[in-house]
Every structure is written in structure tokens, then in C-alpha cells.
Image (cartoon, rainbow, N blue to C red):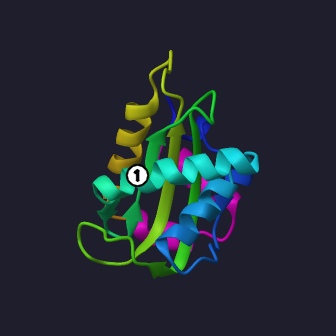
């Protein structure tokens, strides 16, 4: 399983505009191109998940994730907020890089946790925050995943 198989260029946004956690979550959800009702339901699910504990894992990275009926297969998106946003991350630092993962409640291929694990592992690599900061296009993001063999 390669991480880049789950991403598409149109689900990568390098200039998130929102200034709050809720704003950037809504922008990430928007990258999945769902209908308005589904977007609202997904936002509620992600908020519920965040209330259990922040998905900000430190080093400027957050991985908001949940299972939801609004998708019929695993969906992912990536967003970058150059100025950072308060995400109540584990290290209390602003989050700059957000990886959204949404999977259906029942998933035959069972890729949700492996994808979550691969993204977390990717985020812990020493050079990743600098490489994510240096991206100039969604294509660069896809190339980074390919270079890392993810």
C-alpha cells in the first residue's frame, strides 16, 4: 500500500485561508468535494473526534480523522497553513500541516488505520516539516510522497 495512491492533486491545498481550527477543518473537508449536507455531517464528526483529544501530533502536524457514512471509500486531503493555526497540539505549538483522513464505518480493505499510521510515521521523519514548508505546488507534494516511497 502506497500513501500517494490515496491523494489526488485537487485534494491538496498549500494556502489554507482559515484562521481557526474550525475554519481549516471546513477547508480540508471542502477539498473532498462532497455535497453541503455531507460536509456538515463530516464537520460534526471531526469536531466530535477533536473533542476526545487533539489530532495535533506535534512538529506542526495534525491528522484529523474519523469514520463517516458520507464517504464510500477512504478519502484523504492535505492542507498547509503557512502562518499556523492553534490546534491544541500535543506540543502546544501551532499546526502548519494537516492531513485529513475519512473512511466509511465498514471498510472491506481496512486501510484506515494503516494510512493513519503511515502519515504519522511520515510526520516523524526529521526532514519532513522543512520539505512540507518548501512545497510550491500540489505536484511537489505528490513528488515528496513518491520520493519517500510512501
Q: Is residue 106 above or below residue 46?
A: above
Secondary structure, mark 1, is helix
Front-lying residue, 99 or 28: 28
Q: Is residue 147 visible?
A: no
Q: Is residue 47 above or below residue 41?
A: below
Q: Main secondary structure of the magenta part?
A: helix
Front-lying residue, 42 or 137: 42
Q: Is residue 14 above or below residue 102?
A: below
Q: Which x, y percent locates residue 101?
A: 50, 44
Q: Which x, y percent locates residue 113?
A: 38, 33
Q: Is residue 90 left or right of residue 83?
A: left
x 47%, y 71%: residue: 21
Q: Is residue 70 magenta?
A: no
Residue lying at the far bottom of the rendered structure:
83
The stretch in magenta equals 128-150
x 44%, y 56%: residue: 47
Q: Which x, y percent locates residue 10?
A: 74, 53
Q: Is residue 21 above or below residue 56?
A: below
Q: Which x, y percent locates residue 17?
A: 64, 77
Q: Which residue is mark 1?
A: 48
Crowding near the residue tagged with mark 1, few <14, some 14–19, many ≥20 C-alpha atoms within 10 Å:
few
Q: Is residue 132 visible?
A: yes
Amino acid at each position: 500500500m502506497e500513501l500517494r495512491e490515496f491523494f489526488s492533486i485537487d485534494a491538496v491545498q498549500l494556502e489554507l485561508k482559515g484562521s481557526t481550527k474550525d475554519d481549516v477543518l471546513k477547508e480540508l473537508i471542502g477539498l473532498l468535494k462532497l455535497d453541503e449536507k455531507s460536509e456538515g455531517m463530516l464537520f460534526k464528526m471531526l469536531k466530535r473526534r477533536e473533542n476526545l483529544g487533539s489530532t495535533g501530533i506535534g512538529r506542526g502536524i495534525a491528522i484529523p480523522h474519523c469514520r463517516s457514512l458520507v464517504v464510500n471509500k477512504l478519502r484523504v486531503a492535505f492542507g498547509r497553513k503557512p502562518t499556523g493555526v492553534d490546534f491544541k497540539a500535543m506540543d502546544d505549538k501551532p499546526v502548519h500541516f494537516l492531513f485529513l483522513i475519512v473512511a466509511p464505518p465498514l471498510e472491506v480493505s481496512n486501510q484506515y488505520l494503516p494510512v493513519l499510521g503511515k502519515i504519522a510515521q511520515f510526520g516523524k521523519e526529521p526532514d519532513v516539516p522543512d520539505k512540507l514548508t518548501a512545497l510550491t505546488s500540489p505536484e511537489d507534494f505528490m513528488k515528496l510522497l513518491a520520493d519517500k516511497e510512501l
